[in-house]
Image (cartoon, helix red, strand yellow):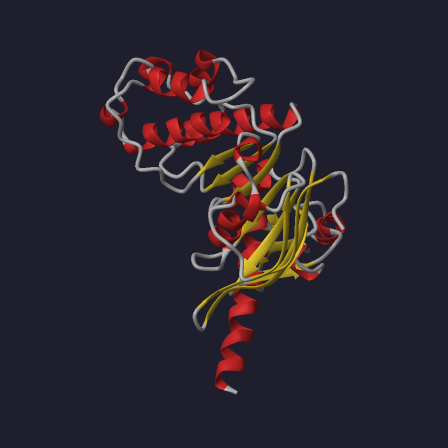
Amino acid sequence: MTSPESHVTVRDLRKQYGSFTALDGVSFDIERGETFALLGPNGAGKSTTIEILEGYRDRSAGEANVLGVDPQHGGLGWKARLGIVLQSSGESGNVTVKEQLSHFAGFYPNPRDVDEVIAAVGLTEKAKTRIKSLSGGQRRRVDVALGVIGRPELLFLDEPTTGFDPEARREFWELIRSLKREGTTILLTTHYLDEAAQLSDRAGVIAGGRLIDIGRIDEIGDADARTPVVRWRDQNGPHEERTTEPAGVVARLYAATGGAEPGNLEIIRPSLEDVYLGLVGAHDATATKKELA
C-alpha cells in the first residue's frame, strides 16, 4: 500500500528480455521532497528502472506507483507533473536556447521563468545561440533546463552532469539544492559518487538487476565498511589500524612518542565511493562463485 508521503513506490519490480533478467525483484520507496540516488555499474538495471517509472517501458511483473499513478497508465496530466533528464537527448535543433526553453515552457501550467532557468544552468551568454552550435557539455545543460522548466513535482535525473566541467557541476548542484528546498522530489542516477553524497538523502545500490543495499547516505554498507582507518609510520615501518575511535588512536600514538607527531599520520574516513565499490565488488565475487559452483 502506498504511503501518502511516498512519491514513488516500487514492489518486486521485474523486467525480462527473453531469457535475460534485467530487474529481479527490486523494491524501494521515495518520500515526498526526498532526493534518492540509484547507484550501480553500467548494465545493472538503473536506466531500466527509471524508464519503467517514467512510463516509457512496461514492467514484466511487480508493482510501481509514481505520484499516485501506475506509470504504465499515466496520461498527459500525469506526465506534466514529471521532469525528465535522460542520459542523452540528441537535441541538436536549429532554434536558440531561449527559443527552445520558451517553447517547452508553454507546455506547462506553471513554468519557471525562462531567463532564470537559463542562468541557473550557466547558459546566459549562450541564450541566443542555436542549440546545434553548442558544445556537448552545453547541450547537456539545455537538457537539464528542459527537465526543470515545468516546475516538476518529481524530477528524474539520469546521469545529469555528464560532460560538465567541475565548475558547471558545482553550479548544477546548487540548482538541485534549490529545487529540493522548494519541495521537489528527485530520483538521481550518477557515476559521480561525490555528487550522490552531496545531493542525496538516501541511496539504493543496484547490481545484476537486484537492489543489494539501501539506506541513508551515511548508513550505506555495513559498519566495517564505514569504519575509519588510521595510518602512520615509525621506525618499524608503516602501520594501519581500523577503528571507530580514530582520535583515541592518535592520542595514544602522540603519548607513546612523547608528544611528537607520528610520521605520515592520516585518518581516512571511507567515502560513499569506497563503500559502494566494496558492495559491488562483494556482489560480483558472490555471483562469480555461484557461476563456478
Q: Is residue 33 visible?
A: yes
The answer to whether 82 is drawn above or below residue 118 in the figure is below
> Is 254 left or right of 48, judged from the image as shown?
right
In terms of depth relative to the viewer, which is nearer, 214 or 104? 104
> Is 148 left or right of 87, judged from the image as shown?
right
In terms of depth relative to the viewer, which is nearer, 33 or 168? 33
Residue 100: percent from the left, percent from the top?
35, 21
- Residue at 50 percent across and 54 percent down: it is 58
In terms of depth relative to the viewer, which is nearer, 260 or 153? 153
User: Which quarter of the picture shows residue 91?
Assistant: top left
Residue 279: percent from the left, percent from the top?
58, 62
Residue 183: percent from the left, percent from the top?
66, 27
- Residue at 56 percent across and 55 percent down: it is 276
Q: Is residue 269 visible?
A: no
The answer to whether 241 is drawn above or below residue 67 in the figure is below
In terms of depth relative to the viewer, which is nearer, 284 or 97? 97
Exactly how many numbered labels are in the figure?
Answer: 0
Residue 192: percent from the left, percent from the top?
48, 44
- Residue at 45 percent across and 31 percent down: it is 169
> Is 114 left or right of 2, judged from the image as shown?
left
